Image (cartoon, grey):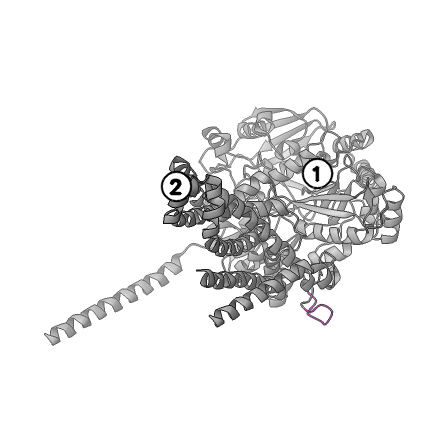
C-alpha cells in the first residue's frame, strides 16, 4: 500500500513538473523560441544554450520548453473534448438503453473501425488547419474510444441491485445519471481519462510531425522531431530531446493512470 | 532402424546442400545477365504528368527522354539545333515558322512520325478544352498549324512571338504518337505515353514508380547529346522520395543511384564523404521568391513592401538554409536567365534601420507599447503562404524571425500541402505574400506572373505600362531591343517591390560513383538520360 502511494507521488511529481514547464514557459525559457540566428545554425551546446542551436539558429532548449506548452495544452484540450463527447454519447447509451443505445454504439463502432489518426486527419480537412483545430480533431478521434468505455462502466453499475431500488423509488433519468451512475463509475472514468490524455499527446505529436497543425514556426515536440530528423548526423539533439520529452510525458501519464487504477480499483 | 534413420537424414542434408548450391549458383548467373538498371529519385509526386497539359518541372525529368522535340538548344552556344525538325525558316516579320522534318523517325508504337503528327500534337495543346497549364503558354499566339507536305509544316502566328523555338525545345511540347493520343482519353493518356525518344514509357504507378525502358530503334539523337543512338542503360526506374530527409539516406544505402534536390545540409555532409558525386545545376527562370499581394493590407502599401525587402537578410538565409550552395537572388529572374539585368543587384540591400524608418512613415506604429506595430488596436499581421517544397517553409520561418525582430510586425505562416491548395489560397487572396516560382530560360516566364490578366498574377498588380513592355518584349525580334525592354521590366518589378527574391534555384543532385554521364539540358531540370552509363 505504501509503495503504491510513493509510486503515485513520483508520477504526480513528474507530471506536475511538466505542467509547470508548460505554464511558466515564458519565465523558464531564456530565449525567444522564434528568434533565429541563421549564421550560427547547428551551434553545439554551450552554457548559454545548453542544447545548442537548431537548423535555423534557434535555441533548442527554449523551443523544447515552449513545445511543452503547445503539446501538453493541446493534449489537454483534446482530452476535455474527447471526455465531454464521450460522456454524452456513452452516458446516453448506458442510461437510456434500447434503440438509442443500439444506434449510438453502432455509430461509435463505425468510427472505431478507422484508425484514430485517420479520423483526426479527416476532421482537420473539414475544420481547416490550425492549433486548436488540430486539438479538436485529436479529441474527436478519441471520443469514440471514451464513449465505449463510459458505456461499459455504466452497464456494470446499471446491473447493481441498488439501481433497481432507486428506479423503484421513482427517480428521474437525470438524477439517476448524476447522483448514482456517474459517482459509482467515477473511479474507472478518471483512470481512463488519463489514458485518453496519453493518447492525445501521442496523436497530437503525430499530427505535428505530419505538419498539418498550422504554422510551422509554433514550437511543438512533434514538429521539432519531424524537422530535426533531417539533421540527426549533424545535430542529433534537435530531434532527440523533444522525442525524449514526449516519451517521458506519455510514460508519466500512463504511470499515474496505473497507480490510480490500483488505488481506485 | 537407426541406420536407416541416419541414411535418410544424410539424404535430406545432401538435398538441402544441392538446393542451396543451385540457388546460389542461379543467383550469380542471373546477376551476370541482369539488365543495367538505374533508380532515379524524384522529389515530389506531380499532380499529373501529361506534358502537354500539366506544368510540374518534375515531369520533364523522365519525359525529356520519352519524347523528342522539334528543336534542341545547345547549352554552350545557346543556339537552336535540329531535333525532329531538320531545318527551319523564320519569316522576316516573325509570323511564319516553316519546318522541314526528319523522315526516318518512328514512334514507340511503330507508327511513323510526320507533319500530320506535329499538327495533331500542337492542336491538342492549343485546344482550350485541354486546359494546358504550361505548353499552351510556351506556344504563344499560334494562329494556324499547317501541313505543307508529308514532312514539312508551317506554324503561323497572329503576333510575333520570339520565344517560340525555346518553347518547342522543351519537353512540354514533346511529340506524342497521334495513334496513342486518339486511343486514350485525356486523363488516361498520361499512363500510356508514346513518344519517339531514346526511352519508352513502360508504366507509371502513382506514388510508387515510373519505369522507362530503352528504345532499341533509336538513332536520331540531337547534337546536344553525346550518344545519338541506343541508350546504354536498359531500364530507368523513377521512384519518389518526397521526404527530403530520406534522400541522402537512399543514395548512401544504394536504394537510388541518382537523387535530385538533396537537402543542402546533406549535400555538405556527402561532399565531405566523397563516396557520392554532387552535380549541381543552376536553374534559369524565377528564383525562390515571395510575391507580395498588392491588394491586401498592409502590403498594398509600397513602403511596407520595400521595408519588408530591406528587413530581409538574404545572405544569412542562403548561408544557413541553402548552405551557400545557391547564389543570392536580387530580381525577378535568376542570373542564368536570358536578358538578366545586373542592375537589380543594387536594390534593397539588407538595412534594418532604413526598413524600420520606412515602415514608420506609413503610420503603422506601436501605439500601445506592446512591442508590436498596431492596426486599429490589434497587432499588425503579415500572412505568408508557403508550399512544402524547395525549403520554402524554412525560409518563411527565417523571414518571420527577421521581420518580427526588425520591423515589429507579427508574421503568420500558412503552409499548404500541394500545388492545387496553393492555387486555392492564391485565389482566396487572403495573404500578404505567397511563394511560387517557375523555371524557364526565356524571360517570358514572367508573363503569367506580371501581366495584369496573367494566370498567376498573384501580386494582384495592374500596370498598363508593364503590360505593354511584357507584350512588346515577347514580340521583339531584335535581341538588343529585347534586352532593353527586359531591363525596364525587371527594374519596374523591383522598384514596385512586387517580389521578394531569395535565392537562385540550384538543383543539387547526388550521384553514385558507378553512374556516369549525367548532364542536363539548358533549362536545368531535365537530364539527357540517353548519355547515362553504368561502370561494371
Q: Percent x, y for residue B269?
A: 63, 64
- The residue at the point 50 percent across, 55 percent down is A190
Let me know if residue A160 appears in the view. Answer: no
In the depicted structure, whether residue B506 falls above or below residue B292: below
Judging from the image, mark 1 belongs to the subunit labelled B
Residue at numbered disc 1: B445
Which residue, given by chain and number where applicable, does mark 2 sit on?
A: A168
Magenta-drawn segment: A41-50
Left or right: A228 with respect to B471?
A: left
Q: Are marks 1 and 2 on the same chain?
A: no
Chain of the residue on which disc 2 is drawn: A
Which of the pair A1/A50 is nearer the observer?
A1
Q: How many marks?
A: 2
Q: Residue at x 89, y 48 (%)?
A: B357
Near mark 2 (Cα within 10 A), the count class, few <14, some 14-19 or many ≥20, is: few
Q: Is residue A214 magenta?
A: no
Query: Residue A201: where, in percent of width, then height?
Result: 55, 55
Q: Determine the main secondary structure of the stretch shown in magenta.
A: loop
Element type at marker 1? helix
Nearer to the camera, B397 or B411: B411
Amino acid at each position: 500500500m505504501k509503495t503504491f502511494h510513493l509510486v503515485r507521488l513520483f508520477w504526480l511529481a513528474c507530471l506536475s513538473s511538466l505542467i509547470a514547464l508548460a505554464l511558466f514557459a515564458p519565465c523558464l525559457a531564456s530565449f525567444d523560441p522564434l528568434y533565429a540566428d541563421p549564421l550560427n545554425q547547428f551551434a553545439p551546446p554551450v552554457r548559454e544554450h545548453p542544447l545548442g542551436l537548431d537548423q535555423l539558429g534557434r535555441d533548442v532548449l527554449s523551443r523544447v520548453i515552449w513545445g511543452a506548452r503547445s503539446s501538453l495544452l493541446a493534449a489537454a484540450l483534446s482530452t476535455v473534448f474527447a471526455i465531454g463527447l464521450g460522456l454524452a454519447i456513452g452516458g446516453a447509451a448506458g442510461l437510456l438503453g434500447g434503440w438509442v443505445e443500439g444506434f449510438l454504439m453502432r455509430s461509435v463502432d463505425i468510427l472505431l473501425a478507422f484508425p484514430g489518426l485517420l479520423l483526426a486527419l479527416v476532421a482537420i480537412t473539414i475544420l481547416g488547419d490550425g492549433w486548436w483545430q488540430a486539438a479538436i480533431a485529436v479529441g474527436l478521434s478519441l471520443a469514440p474510444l471514451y464513449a465505449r468505455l463510459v458505456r461499459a462502466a455504466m452497464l456494470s453499475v446499471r446491473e447493481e441491485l441498488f439501481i433497481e431500488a432507486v428506479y423503484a423509488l421513482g427517480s428521474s433519468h437525470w438524477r439517476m445519471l448524476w447522483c448514482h451512475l456517474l459517482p459509482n463509475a467515477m473511479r474507472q472514468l478518471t483512470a481512463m481519462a488519463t489514458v485518453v490524455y496519453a493518447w492525445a499527446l501521442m496523436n497530437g505529436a503525430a499530427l505535428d510531425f505530419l505538419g498539418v497543425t498550422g504554422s510551422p514556426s509554433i514550437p511543438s515536440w512533434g514538429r521539432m522531431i519531424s524537422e530535426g530528423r533531417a539533421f540527426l548526423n549533424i545535430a542529433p539533439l534537435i530531434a532527440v530531446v523533444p522525442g525524449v520529452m514526449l516519451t517521458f510525458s506519455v510514460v508519466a501519464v500512463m504511470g499515474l493512470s496505473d497507480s490510480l487504477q490500483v488505488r481506485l480499483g | 532402424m537407426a541406420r536407416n534413420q541416419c541414411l535418410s537424414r544424410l539424404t535430406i542434408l545432401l538435398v538441402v546442400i544441392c538446393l542451396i548450391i543451385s540457388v546460389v549458383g542461379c543467383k550469380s548467373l542471373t546477376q551476370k545477365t541482369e539488365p543495367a538498371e538505374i533508380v532515379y529519385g524524384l522529389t515530389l509526386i506531380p499532380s499529373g504528368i501529361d506534358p502537354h497539359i500539366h506544368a510540374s518541372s518534375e515531369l520533364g525529368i523522365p519525359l525529356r527522354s520519352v519524347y523528342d522535340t522539334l528543336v534542341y538548344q545547345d547549352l554552350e552556344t545557346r543556339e537552336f539545333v535540329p531535333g525532329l525538325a531538320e531545318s527551319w525558316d523564320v519569316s522576316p516579320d516573325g509570323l511564319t515558322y516553316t519546318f522541314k522534318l526528319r523522315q526516318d523517325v518512328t514512334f514507340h508504337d511503330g507508327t511513323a512520325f510526320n507533319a500530320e503528327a506535329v499538327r495533331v500534337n500542337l492542336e491538342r495543346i492549343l485546344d482550350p478544352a485541354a486546359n494546358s497549364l504550361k505548353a499552351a503558354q510556351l506556344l504563344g499566339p499560334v494562329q494556324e498549324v499547317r501541313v505543307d507536305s508529308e514532312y514539312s509544316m508551317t506554324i503561323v502566328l497572329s503576333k510575333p512571338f520570339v520565344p517560340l523555338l525555346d518553347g518547342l525545345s522543351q519537353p512540354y511540347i514533346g511529340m506524342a504518337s497521334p495513334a496513342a493520343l486518339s486511343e486514350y482519353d485525356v486523363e488516361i493518356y498520361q499512363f500510356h505515353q508514346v513518344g519517339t525518344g531514346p526511352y519508352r514509357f513502360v508504366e507509371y504507378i502513382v506514388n510508387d514508380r515510373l519505369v522507362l525502358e530503352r528504345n532499341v530503334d533509336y538513332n536520331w539523337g540531337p547534337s546536344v547529346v553525346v550518344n545519338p543512338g541506343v541508350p546504354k542503360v536498359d531500364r530507368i526506374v523513377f521512384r519518389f522520395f518526397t521526404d527530403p530527409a530520406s534522400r541522402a539516406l537512399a543514395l548512401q544505402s544504394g536504394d537510388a543511384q541518382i537523387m535530385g534536390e538533396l537537402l543542402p545540409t546533406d549535400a555538405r555532409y556527402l561532399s565531405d564523404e566523397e563516396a557520392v558525386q554532387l552535380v549541381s545545376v543552376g536553374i534559369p527562370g524565377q528564383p525562390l521568391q515571395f510575391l507580395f499581394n498588392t491588394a491586401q493590407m498592409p502590403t498594398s502599401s509600397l513602403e511596407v513592401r520595400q521595408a519588408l525587402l530591406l528587413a530581409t537578410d538574404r545572405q544569412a538565409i542562403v548561408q544557413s538554409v541553402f548552405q551557400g550552395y545557391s547564389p543570392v537572388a536580387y530580381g525577378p529572374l535568376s542570373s542564368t536567365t536570358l536578358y538578366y539585368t545586373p542592375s537589380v543587384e543594387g536594390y534593397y540591400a539588407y538595412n534594418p534601420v532604413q526598413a524600420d524608418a520606412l515602415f514608420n512613415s506609413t503610420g503603422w506604429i506601436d501605439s500601445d507599447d506592446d512591442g508590436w506595430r498596431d492596426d486599429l488596436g490589434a497587432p499588425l499581421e503579415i500572412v505568408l503562404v508557403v508550399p512544402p517544397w524547395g525549403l520554402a517553409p524554412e525560409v518563411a520561418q527565417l523571414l518571420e524571425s527577421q521581420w518580427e525582430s526588425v520591423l515589429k510586425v507579427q508574421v503568420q505562416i500558412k503552409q499548404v500541402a500541394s500545388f492545387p491548395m496553393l492555387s486555392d489560397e492564391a485565389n482566396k487572396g487572403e495573404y500578404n505574400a505567397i511563394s511560387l516560382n517557375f523555371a524557364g530560360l526565356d524571360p517570358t516566364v514572367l508573363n503569367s506572373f506580371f501581366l495584369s490578366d496573367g494566370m498567376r498574377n498573384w501580386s494582384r498588380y495592374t500596370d498598363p505600362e508593364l503590360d505593354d513592355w511584357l507584350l512588346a518584349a515577347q514580340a521583339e525580334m531584335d535581341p538588343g531591343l529585347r534586352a532593353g525592354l527586359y531591363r525596364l521590366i525587371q527594374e519596374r518589378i523591383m522598384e514596385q517591390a512586387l517580389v521578394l527574391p531569395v535565392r537562385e534555384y540550384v538543383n543539387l543532385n547526388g550521384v553514385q560513383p558507378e553512374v556516369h554521364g549525367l548532364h542536363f539540358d539548358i533549362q536545368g531540370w531535365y537530364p539527357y538520360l540517353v548519355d547515362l552509363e553504368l561502370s561494371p
